[in-house]
Image (cartoon, helix red, strand yellow):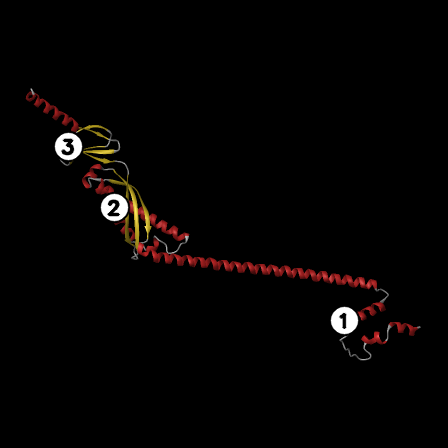
Amino acid sequence: MLKKKLPLIIGSLLVVAYLMTSFFVVNEAEYSIVTRFGRTVAVHDEPGLRVKLPMPFERVVRFDKRNMYQIIPEEEFLTSDKKNIVVSSFLTWRIVDPEKFLTALRTRDAAEARIENLMKSLFGAALGQKPFTDYIPADITQASDMRAAENISIMEEKIYNEASALASRDYGIELTNIGVSKFNFPAQNLISVYARMRAERERIAKSYRSEGDAEARKVIADANRRSAEIISAAEAEAEIARGEAEAEAARIYAEAYKDKEGFYEFLRTLEVYGSIIDNDTTLILPEDSPLLDLLTNPPLENRKADR
């Protein structure tokens, strides 16, 4: 009985194997390429159930059709003035021509290796056309930083355009984004770079201090000028007030001593004596000096003589 059923069992197994290797499902996030002895016979990018010849006649190769993210490790390049600079970048890409991709690369690992080499080659060529200071400024001014950022952006766009054209033409790949993630000095150059940055900051600080000192001198000079003007105006007003007061005092004196000129002269003479004569003063005057008139001929004796 077993010998009679054996051909039937084998036939059933062959039919099952044929059915299992003849039907395959295409996922919505992938390309499915049917190859016959290494040659592409069909490319499926719509999801669903598909049929092919059983193995080993036909095989299915699957590729992801979504965007893939790739990091390009940092590499040291030379600028046009022979300065070393370290750059690392990233990019995203996707397969747009699965048949060309299969023929040129076959696997994602091979594609990433080829893309990495392409990117490093393009970065080296682009950086070699510009001096070091176009990408990392020698000073720390905002204008220099903006100019360096603009140069990096221009370089990224140029590399993107060149890499996109090559990847599409040779590998069936579309580059969707490229960016620089690190742009720095080599480790052995950091000490000299930091010293230069420190010197630049000291120069800027000195400039700020000099400007501050100049502004301070200007403020002080302006304050002194205004102070002198205020004092001068105040002294002028004081002189005017003093002159007016003296004039008023003279007027009051004149009214007070009106018709009493002799008495006024007598008081003024006493004031003069008080201002020039004291216990330590020796005064030598001629006999007919008007200053001695009050002493030699007092008013009281003059009145007695008159009587």
What is the tally of numbered marks visible in this picture?
Answer: 3
Left or right of 187 in this view: 207: right
When the figure is inspected, residue 298 is found, relative to residue 5, above or below; the finding is below
> Tag on residue 275?
1
**Distance between the alpha carbons at the discs numbered 1 and 3:** 139 Å
The residue carrying pointer 1 sits among few (fewer than 14), some (14 to 19) or many (20 or more) residues within 10 Å by Cα, namely few
Q: Amino acid at mark 2?
A: Glu
Secondary structure under badge 2? helix
> Tag on residue 58?
3
Label 2 sits on residue: 116
Q: Amino acid at mark 3?
A: Glu
> Tag on residue 147?
none
First in sequence, mark 1 or 3: give its number.
3
The residue carrying pointer 2 sits among few (fewer than 14), some (14 to 19) or many (20 or more) residues within 10 Å by Cα, namely some
Quarter of the image where the C terminus is located: bottom right
Secondary structure under badge 1? helix
Residue 169, given in percent of the width and then of the height, sits at 23, 42
Residue 214, given in percent of the width and then of the height, sits at 51, 60
